[in-house]
Image (cartoon, rainbow, N blue to C red):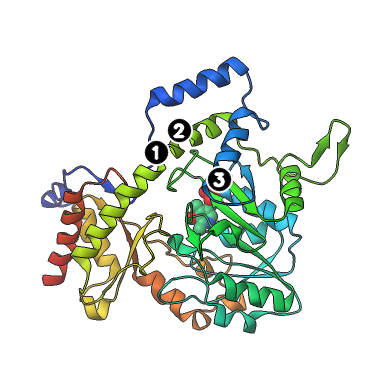
Amino acid sequence: MVMPTMINKKSTKKPIYTTRPIVPDLSDYIKKLETIWNNKWFTNMGDMHKELEEVLQKKLQVNNLSLFNNGTIALITACRALRLSGEVITTPFSFAATPHVLTWNNIKPIFCDIDPDTYNLNPELIEDLITSDTTGIMPVHVFGMPCECLKIQQIADDYGLKVIYDAAHSFGVKYLEKGIGNYGDCSMFSFHATKMFHTAEGGALTCNDKKLKKRLDLLKNFGIKDEDHVSMPGINGKLNELSAALGLVVLSMYNKEREKRKQLFAQYFKWLENIDGIKLPYHLNSNNHNYQYFPIQIDKQDFGVSRNFVKLKFEEQNIFARKYFYPLCSNYSCYQQLESAKIENLPIANKTSQEILCLPLYGDLKMSEVSMICQTILGIKKN
Ligand SMILES: *Cc1c(COP(=O)(O)O)cnc(C)c1O
């Protein structure tokens, strides 16, 4: 039974979500649509697709880039192109797509614990998980924070393994002066609407090997080589022209969006620095950061209340923060029976998953809203 006093408890404030997509001027998009209408060409690597591949290749500072209809299909295709099989070492602290992509390739995901500060795969723990069945490593640059790519590459070279990065969060991120998409054998970027650069749905693979790029292009188009030859069992991974056109107009707004987020990010730091029990995102060189997320970690012991309590308090104010990543992939019912998924094998990832909370961060978020969110946190701490 609902008590009458509880009915009015819900806040009437405008809801604040964790993220909001870049929304270009409709008139800019319509101009692109007019071109598509005139060409009568809606998909199959048209002019928009071609242009977007070229500009993104420059923007991400990579040698080869192949667009896809989403990041998950792109990652599935990368595993096929690099002929991964058997076992692949990955992180449990990611979005569902990461281990699922391996499963869809009949590969057993082997979960490896993470670094407590960067939340990325801990390279020191990889070697112990390598067996005669291991063919690759699939790390994630979590929240756009680069992995220790050189250490990971060294292990891969020592054992003859492939490395495919899930760079879904890492649009525009650089590592050691190079675009992040240059590391490993292949990297996947997601252009889903929740990501900073987006095409509504979409994604891309980047790689250094020209031959691999050719293979990716074939695989994403059913393996069709020419009118008379189908050379391999491919899939439909093509990005359509409507999405590619959206990408072109969204891209022109990206730098401004990043700049706005950068200022909000700094504002969060000002408010939340030096609060017992709150760990702020690992500090990055500001030239490398894309400000995709603002994750905080709440230690119940030191802060006084749990992450879940803070999230509920936010909801009373119509603030919707997200528990990225909870549940941990290794605790999904489809993976928890794996030896590597045991909680005692993944102590850092399990702890982080219980404590992490991504606060709202997007260009149109107001400074006053950041202040209000932070004051809510400080208010909880006091009580
Ligand atoms: C968004 C995301 C994906 C999946 O990308 P889609 O484009 O939505 O298929 C994969 N991995 C991570 C870490 C993501 O955040």
Inspect the image, locate mark 2, and give the three-letter code of the amino acid beneath it. Answer: Val
Answer left or right for 48 relative to 357: right
Q: Nearer the viewer, residue 315 or 197?
A: 197
Q: Earlier in the sequence, mark 3 or mark 2?
A: 3
Residue shown at the point (76%, 60%) measured from the top left: 83
Q: CA distance from mark 3 to mark 1?
A: 16 Å
Q: Are marks 3 and 1 in contact (CB under 8 Å)?
A: no
Residue 147 at what x, y percent from top left?
Answer: 51, 68
Q: Earlier in the sequence, mark 3 or mark 1?
A: 3
How busy is the neighbourhood of tag 2: few (under 14 within 10 Å), some, or many (20 plus)? Answer: many
The answer to whether residue 149 shows anywhere in this view is yes
Secondary element under disc 3, as helix, strand or loop, is helix
Inspect the image, locate mark 1, and give the three-letter code of the amino acid beneath it. Answer: Met
Q: Is residue 291 above or below residue 49?
A: below
Inspect the image, locate mark 3, and give the three-letter code of the amino acid beneath it. Answer: Lys
Secondary element under disc 2, as helix, strand or loop, is helix
Q: Is residue 152 above or below residue 34?
A: below
Q: Please give the residue where the numbered disc 1 appears in the rendered image.
A: 253
